């Protein structure tokens, strides 16, 4: 069924892919976002290896201001804020990425099924989805995390499941448009089975919206996980997680003196989510043209 | 119109029943024996059983659900396990406080983001458009407690133009209260601005490209009249729809913002109830939030259909 690539000549699909990549590289927002994400990803992988000091080590110089020895100052337990900011990208990136992958896999499957079969299943699932979505996401997440107890896998699964209906809604809409195209009835007349048509015929044609949804969803996952962590229902201490650093130190804020304990982790979160959104914007402009 | 309203309300009711089942099921997952967790490890088994019986948690689950809903409909939201007082007596004040905060945020964000979106659309592709669109996109992505930290630092501590707490001293007048609520609501505004402005921009661009706009220009009507009488009227419709969908976010955002500012709102109540496993407070609080949200979206839908005859007539056919 695929066009057979003639020896030495790249196939049409490959040319199209190369063109898309070329457009992405020329997109300034995409490059800006990708560079910042790359920086935080390196920090997440290298972790404490590149941090000048141990992010968990406590010292006697408590709440010292930014200076030569502690670039970003120290927190209430005398831990080096600069090292903690560098090491803090690991927890949020892994949790948010895992939750996003979970949501994309489940949401794509549900969206394909409901969009392809429609009928009663679609009605019931859509109603349930509406019911779940009619509650503020973070409220539902708090209730479930409290009920199941805190742990990183729980956090990933809860956020993943809550994002599943959002993904499935997008995928379903894309499937509804695709199933009207000639190649779907053609495959059916050829005698292909439904799972084959859904996953091998329709799925490759809707990768664009799914990729866009994935990057957008990653931004929301970070938003949600950071919010839950700030509330105390997400990543647990003593992790140098950014939201956790803010939660630990924000009560010192009204006094006005110890701003460095919250400003730097806040800037880190902001830079990461903005970078992801810039990248998502770049990708959607190229793919949804 | 009546049929449209009826169908829309019925739909909201079905959703509400589903939500109540979900909330109840989640509350049932809270681990442990309710009587034991209230009375503590040293209480005798007999008094634990007695309390469980008194609270009715020893009955089958569907009976418990039925009696919860029955009482809820009659305005009895149950007794808080933690404070041993009616849930509603605590929830009422909190809900009122939250509504105040949400109202300030709402009043700020709607005109601001519509103005931003329309301005971006009128200057499509130019610098103003890029700046507004990218600013909105970036602000939307940043979690509200992070934006709030920046706002507290810059406006509250460095420029000292706004108070850093949300609760005004008791007995303050209207304007003082609003002044105290500005900082927390600005954090919510920053998140919502991007969404609403994006919709307003898209709606305006669509209306600007439409045939009726060209016709209006060709008839010789001035630019201002074309924009106000033809473009805005059509472009603001999708914006109203998106404002309604963001009500859910607004209420969820309250959870985080109220904790950050230590403000006695419904989000703070639910947060404390979740932490202390006060499940009567938790399930009734969450259901109240769902009702507020559904009523808000219902009102928005009605407003939308009033402004858009196409929907009104299509539904009554």
Image (cartoon, rainbow, N blue to C red):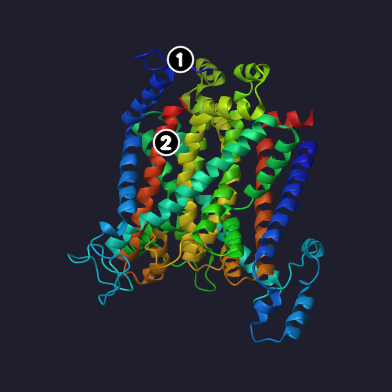
A184 and A243: which one is in front? Answer: A184
Identity of the residue drawn at 76% across and 32% down? B315
Q: Is residue A183 above or below residue A229?
A: above
B266 and A201: which one is in front? Answer: A201
Identity of the residue drawn at 51% across and 53% down? A156
Q: Position of residue A105 (x, y in %)?
A: 55, 41
The dot on residue A281 is 2
Residue A34, quarter of picture: top left
Query: Do the residues at discs 1 and 2 belong to one chain?
Result: yes
Q: CA distance from mark 1 to mark 2?
A: 34 Å
The dot on residue A4 is 1
Report whether B134 appears left or right of B228. left
Callout 2: few (<14), some (14-19), or many (20+) C-alpha neighbours within 10 Å?
many
Can residue B192 be seen here? The reply is: no
Residue A236, quarter of picture: bottom left
The dot on residue B81 is none
Identity of the residue drawn at 48% across and 23% down? B222
Tell which circle, 1 or 2, labels the residue nearer the N-terminal end. 1
Q: Position of residue A6 (x, y in %)?
A: 40, 12
Residue found at the very far left of the displayed protein: A68
Callout 1: few (<14), some (14-19), or many (20+) C-alpha neighbours within 10 Å?
few
Of badges 1 and 2, the one in the foreground is 1
Q: Is residue A207 above or below residue A186?
A: below
Q: Is residue A82 above or below residue A120?
A: below
């Amino acid at each position: 069924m695929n066009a057979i690539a003639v020896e030495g000549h790249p196939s049409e699909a490959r040319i199209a892919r190369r063109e898309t990549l070329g457009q992405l590289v020329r997109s300034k927002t995409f490059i800006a976002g990708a560079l910042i994400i790359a920086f935080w990803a390196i920090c997440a992988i290298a972790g404490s290896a590149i941090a000048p000091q141990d992010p968990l080590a406590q010292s006697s110089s408590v709440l010292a201001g930014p200076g030569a020895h502690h670039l970003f100052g120290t927190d209430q337990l005398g831990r080096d804020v600069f090292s903690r900011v560098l090491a803090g990208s690991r927890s949020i990136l892994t949790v948010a990425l895992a939750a996003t992958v979970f949501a994309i896999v489940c949401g794509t499957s549900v969206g394909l099924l409901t969009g392809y079969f429609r009928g009663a299943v679609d009605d019931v699932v859509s109603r349930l989805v509406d019911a779940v979505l009619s509650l503020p996401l973070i409220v539902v997440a708090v209730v479930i995390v409290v009920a199941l107890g805190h742990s990183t896998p729980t956090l990933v699964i809860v956020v993943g499941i809550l994002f599943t209906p959002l993904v499935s809604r997008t995928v379903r809409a894309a499937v509804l448009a695709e199933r009207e195209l000639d190649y779907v009835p053609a495959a059916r007349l050829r005698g292909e089975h439904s799972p084959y048509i859904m996953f091998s015929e329709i799925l490759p044609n809707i990768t664009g919206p799914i990729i866009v949804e994935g990057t957008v969803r990653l931004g929301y996952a970070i938003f949600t996980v950071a919010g839950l962590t700030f509330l105390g229902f997400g990543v647990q201490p003593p992790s140098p997680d950014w939201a956790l650093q803010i939660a630990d130190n924000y009560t010192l804020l009204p006094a006005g003196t110890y701003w460095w304990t919250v400003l730097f982790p806040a800037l880190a979160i902001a830079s990461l989510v903005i970078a992801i959104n810039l990248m998502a914007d770049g990708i959607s402009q190229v793919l949804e043209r | 119109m009546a049929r449209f309203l009826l169908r829309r309300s019925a739909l909201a009711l079905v959703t509400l029943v589903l939500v109540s089942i979900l909330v109840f099921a989640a509350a049932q997952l809270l681990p442990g024996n309710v009587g034991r967790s209230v009375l503590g490890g040293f209480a005798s088994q007999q008094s634990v059983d007695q309390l469980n019986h008194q609270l009715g948690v020893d009955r089958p689950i569907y009976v418990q659900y039925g009696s919860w809903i029955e009482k809820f409909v009659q305005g009895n939201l149950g007794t808080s396990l933690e404070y041993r007082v009616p849930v509603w007596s605590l929830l009422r004040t909190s809900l009122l406080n939250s509504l105040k905060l949400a109202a300030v945020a709402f009043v700020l964000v709607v005109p601001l983001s519509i103005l931003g979106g329309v301005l971006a659309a009128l200057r499509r592709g130019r610098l103003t458009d890029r700046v507004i669109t990218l600013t909105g996109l970036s602000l939307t992505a940043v979690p509200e407690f992070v934006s709030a930290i920046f706002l507290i630092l810059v406006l509250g501590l460095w420029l000292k133009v706004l108070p850093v707490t949300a609760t005004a001293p008791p007995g303050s007048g209207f304007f003082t209260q609003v002044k105290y609520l500005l900082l927390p609501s600005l954090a919510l505004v920053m998140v919502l601005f991007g969404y609403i402005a994006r919709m307003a921009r898209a709606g305006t661009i669509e209306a600007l490209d439409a045939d009726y706009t060209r016709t209006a220009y060709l008839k010789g009507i001035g630019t201002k009249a074309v924009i106000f009488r033809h473009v805005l009227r059509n472009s603001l419709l999708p914006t109203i729809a998106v404002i309604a969908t963001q009500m859910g976010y607004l209420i969820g955002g309250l959870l985080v913002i109220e904790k950050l500012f230590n403000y006695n709102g419904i989000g703070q109540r639910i947060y404390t109830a979740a932490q202390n496993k006060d499940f009567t407070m938790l399930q009734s609080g969450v259901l109240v939030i769902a009702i507020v949200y559904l009523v808000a979206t219902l009102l928005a839908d009605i407003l939308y259909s009033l402004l858009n005859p196409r929907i009104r007539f299509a539904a009554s056919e």
